[in-house]
Amino acid sequence: MGTKIGDWIHERSGWREQYRALFLRKIPKINWLYTLGSATLVTMVIQIVTGILLTLYYVPDPQEAYASVSYITNDLPFGWLIRGLHHWGASAMVLLVILHMVRVIMYGAYKYPREFTWFTGVALLLLTFSFGFTGYLLPWDQRAYWATVVGTRIGEVTPVVGDSLRQIMLGGDEISGLTLTRFFGAHVWVLPSLLLLLVGIHLYLVIRNGITAVPKRGE
Amino acid sequence: MSDNGDQPVDDEAGSSPGAGDDTQAEEKGISRRKLLARSVGVMSGAMAAAIGVPAVLYVTGPTREQAAIEKWIRLGSASSVETGTQTLMKATVEKRSGYLTETQELAVFVSTENGSDFVALSNVCTHLGCRVRWVENQNEFFCPCHNGVFAADGTVLAGPPPRPLDRFETKVEDGQIFIKEV
């Protein structure tokens, strides 16, 4: 039954070849450090799933944001779990993406022909930080507020464009309801769109070029 | 895509040459490849369930909240209801949705034959939820959305409605009419 449906779809899509190219591709003899990229990817999927679930109840409004987060955490069944996964998943993703990058640096895996993969990876690192920064404001509590004050003040010291940068981030001179809605919009629409695009390119390149072997001393 | 993807790699001689090729696997019981594939499948399924089951409960949470206490809603003075017609009475009720309390307007057609027993009919059409109105000279309720027609006692006379207008339980206290919240 399963294979019959699989055959039917395969005849019309050729998915089995794609499946082989994706999951049964040839790889060199490697070690566990090579799973850090996949681990980051799994964390990303968890963040997407739990993030979508949170938007079902979260309200990006200065009057309602904190109350809606409190409702999710304290009143909804398993709300604490969904929010907890998103909270800890965010930290895990930052950690994993950095460890993944360190592995790539230590093994020299950014070299020809994988420079472009590296560039997209650097962009993905910055995107991950941007997710963390914009998501941190959304609970709209004291910690969120002051972290955003500090974060945008750091952005302000950028030469020449600093002042404008802070104003654009905040949607004005101070943190307001506009800041909350634009951080929310960035966190759930702008950044995810860029993330999926870049992850798509990144993964295509990883499969296109294959992965590096563990470098040997003296080579 | 790349020429890497043609054949799966076999790092140990004698293992099965490709996924989905069961012939050798059956001879040896279960191949290493198949065991790993199944383990990955089982673990993925377990992880999906670990998020999926709470997710379903989380999404459906507010719909499973039960009203703990029964509530009577005051509509107005019983003396304002005349015999032989329908009187539209309105009340605002507080509804809790999540952490918010919202006020909703409730409109009920109240009628009486003897001035002491009251019938309270919902003004919500049983077809698709539009609001019905009382047509005095026809002595019937009419729903403008799909031409549903109900008699004065709420029974369906014409059109698509599948059942009579909903009735509220009523009571009179100190000359005031109350209906029971459903």
Image (cartoon, grey):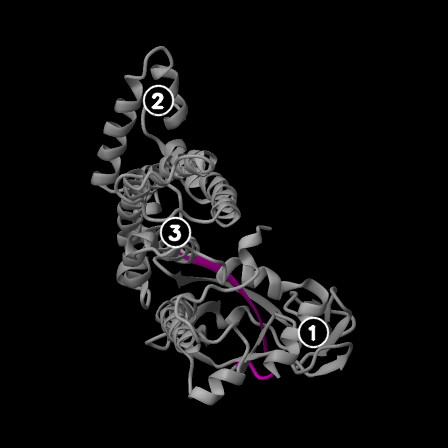
Residue that appears at 67% across and 68% down: A10
> Numbered disc 1: what chain?
A
The lab-note entry on whether marks 2 and 1 share a chain reads yes
- Which image quarter: residue B173? bottom left
The image shows residue A137, relative to residue B126, as above or below, that is above
Q: Which residues are magenta?
A: B101-115
Q: Please tell me whether mark 1 sits on a helix, a strand or a loop.
A: helix
Which numbered circle lies on residue A8?
1
Q: Earlier in the sequence, mark 3 or mark 2?
A: 3
Name the one closer to the observer, A13 or A150. A13
Q: Nearer the viewer, residue A32 or B148?
A: A32
Give the amino acid at mark 3: Tyr
Task: Tell me, yes or no, if residue B49 can be seen here.
Answer: yes
Q: Please give the label number shown on residue A166.
A: 2
Residues under labels 1 and 3: Cα distance? 42 Å
Q: Which residue was labeled with disc 3?
A: A58
The foreground one among A149 and B95 is A149
Residue A71 in view, yes or no:
no
Would residue B147 appear left or right of B25 to someone viewing this image?
A: right
Q: Main secondary structure of the magenta part?
A: strand
Q: Nearer the viewer, mark 3 or mark 2?
A: 2
Relative to A44, is A90 on the left or the right? Answer: left
Look at 64% across and 72% down and name the residue there. B86
Q: On the same chain: label 3 and label 2? A: yes
Q: Which of pointers 1 and 3 indicates the residue nearer the eye?
A: 1
